[in-house]
Image (cartoon, rainbow, N blue to C red):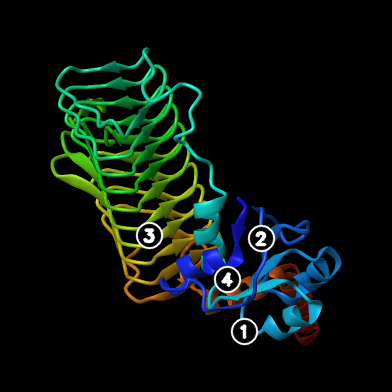
């Protein structure tokens, strides 16, 4: 890395990522706060980490206004102030400590790749071993296509797309700029569309639509996003998927959602902007989820969610109601015992009255 703190500040202060810099130092690497020593830049936004920088004395610290005086007291050479330490961590590590996918052991274009003559690959793109790219695929600049990827005919990729190994981009699907597709994911798999006859046999309904992933969408490993029956399945700008997620046909997902592992949504549901889900969230078909909804505790969504807020459980409840229900649930064995005792007392009372 070998970069001065003042040089980092000159790059990121105009963008608002960093607000001020006290002192200066030479930074050789970005390190975790627990082990960062001389030459390291670390990030701290919690008081419990102060003991690490006191012991290890890293060369630079990024912190917030609540901790800056305590960090100064440690005697760190260079101290950055950031309004959001997490964002500063993300942006600085992207620039100085991310994996460089353009440093490939295979060179820019592996000879084993099979590319249709009608598809033109910009010189700025990287194509790994055993890649298969179909007819009339459109590429932006600086895309990385890793080993074993299949991109089918008429797909479109914007600038700076990263497609990790053994993923599939289906025919006619559209990726915006800076889209990340992690290992083993399928974009444009066929939607689950079948009609059942009187004989109880199923008849396949061809799914001939496509998938649109807007700018800055990230899709984790081993996910499936199905193509629509006729029009499109769309994921809007900035949404992030964890691993092992499934999006059914004709679904629309809004901007800046964070959808964690095990997220499953059935067909034709519309999810608003900035929706957050915890693990193993299931959402039924043809529903509407409002903006700024947070779904927690293995949520099972079977009805529209019309207002923003926190919801939890199955059946889904507002979070306050869920916690009250959970408190009652935990007391059920005791309540059952008390009811049993009361029933016995009542039976005894009835018997004595009859006699």
Disc 4 crowd rating (10 Å Cα; few below 14, some 14-19, many 20+) is: some
For residue 58, side relative to residue 240 (left or right) = right
Question: Sequence-wise, which precedes: disc 3 or disc 2?
Answer: 2
For marks 3 and 4, give the one nearer the viewer: 4
Q: Which residue is mark 3?
A: 302
Question: Sequence-wise, which precedes: disc 2 or disc 1?
Answer: 2
Which of the labelled discs sits on residue 95, or is there none? none
**Cα–Cα span, label 3 and label 4:** 38 Å
Q: Which residue is mark 2?
A: 26
Question: Sequence-wise, which precedes: disc 3 or disc 1?
Answer: 1
Question: Sequence-wise, which precedes: disc 2 or disc 4?
Answer: 2
Which of the labelled discs sits on residue 65, or is there none? 1
For residue 216, side relative to residue 67 (left or right) = left
Q: Are marks 3 and 1 in contact (CB under 8 Å)?
A: no
Q: Which residue is mark 4?
A: 85
**Cα–Cα span, label 2 and label 4:** 20 Å
For marks 2 and 1, give the one nearer the viewer: 2
**Secondary-structure class at tag 3:** loop
User: Taking 154 as reference, is 1 above or below it?
Assistant: below
For marks 2 and 4, give the one nearer the viewer: 2
- What residue do we see at 53% from left, 42% from top? 99
């Amino acid at each position: 890395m070998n970069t001065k703190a003042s040089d980092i500040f000159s790059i990121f202060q105009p963008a608002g990522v960093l607000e001020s810099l006290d002192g200066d130092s030479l930074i050789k690497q970005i390190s975790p706060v627990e082990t960062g020593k001389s030459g390291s830049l670390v990030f701290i936004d919690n008081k419990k980490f102060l003991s690490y920088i006191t012991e290890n004395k890293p060369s630079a610290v990024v912190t917030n206004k609540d901790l800056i005086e305590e960090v100064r007291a440690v005697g760190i050479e260079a101290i950055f102030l950031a309004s959001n330490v997490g964002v500063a961590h993300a942006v600085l590590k992207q620039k100085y400590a991310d994996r460089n996918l353009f440093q490939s052991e295979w060179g820019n274009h592996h000879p084993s790749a099979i590319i249709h003559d009608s598809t033109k690959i910009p010189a700025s793109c990287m194509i790994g071993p055993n890649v298969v790219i179909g007819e009339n695929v459109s590429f932006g600049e600086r895309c990385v296509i890793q080993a074993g990827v299949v991109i089918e005919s008429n797909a479109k990729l914007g600038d700076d797309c990263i497609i990790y190994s053994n993923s599939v981009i289906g025919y006619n699907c559209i990726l915006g700029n800076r889209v990340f597709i992690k290992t083993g994911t399928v974009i444009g798999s066929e939607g689950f569309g079948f009609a059942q006859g009187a004989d109880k046999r199923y008849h396949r309904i061809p799914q001939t639509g496509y998938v649109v992933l807007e700018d800055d969408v990230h899709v984790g490993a081993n996910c499936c996003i199905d193509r629509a029956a006729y029009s499109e399945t769309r994921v809007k700008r900035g949404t992030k998927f964890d691993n092992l997620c499934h999006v059914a046909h004709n679904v629309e997902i809004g901007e800046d959602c964070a959808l964690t592992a095990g997220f499953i949504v059935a067909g034709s549901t519309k999810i608003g902007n900035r929706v957050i889900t915890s693990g193993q969230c299931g959402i039924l078909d043809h529903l509407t989820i409002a903006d700024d909804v947070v779904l927690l505790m293995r949520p099972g969504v079977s009805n529209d969610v019309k207002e923003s807020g926190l919801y939890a459980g199955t059946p889904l409840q507002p979070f306050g109601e869920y916690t009250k229900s959970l408190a009652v649930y935990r007391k059920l064995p005791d309540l059952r015992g008390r009811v049993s005792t009361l029933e016995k007392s009542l039976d005894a009372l009835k018997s004595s009255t009859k006699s």
